[in-house]
Amino acid sequence: ELLNNTTTTLMAQVDTTGVKAVEFNYIFIRDNLVRKGVVNVVKSNADDSSLTLAVDEEYSENGPVGATITVYESGDYVNIAYSSTNTGITGQIYHSLNYLA
């Protein structure tokens, strides 16, 4: 469920031990508005000593859905979350996660 007026709501968490890249595909639907996108996250260090991320997001929407994606690190984990504005309308989230080890 896409909650109304929320900040940093976790959708996925990936243990990056041995994982080099993550692809997160998503669709947000709120009323008749749709946002479809993909977030690519790549570990940019070679030796896994200190997790540093390169993040790229591409999306399209038919109007302002009022939701955004955030990617952040926590220890050896990559977290993918969303925040949403107050439109008074909850919605739906569909997503898939792929990774390269």
Image (cartoon, rainbow, N blue to C red):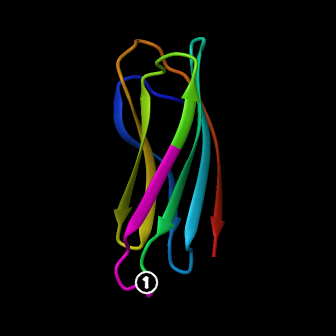
Within 10 Å of disc 1 (Cα), the crowding (few <14, some 14-19, many 20+) is some
Q: Is residue 96 left or right of residue 2?
A: right
Q: Residue at the location (57% across, 61% down)?
A: 22
Identify residue for label 1.
48
For numbered disc 1, what is the local secondary structure? loop
Q: Quadrant of residue 6?
A: top left
Eyeballing the image, is 89 above or below 97? above
Q: Quadrant of residue 55?
A: bottom left
Q: Residue at the location (47% across, 14% down)?
A: 89
Residue 46 position in % (x across, y down): 46, 84
Residue 13 position in % (x across, y down): 50, 59
Eyeballing the image, is 60 above or below 25? above
Magenta residues (range): 47-57
Residue 33 position in % (x across, y down): 57, 16
Q: Residue at the location (36% across, 23% down)?
A: 85
Q: Quadrant of residue 81?
A: top left
Eyeballing the image, is 36 above or below 34? below
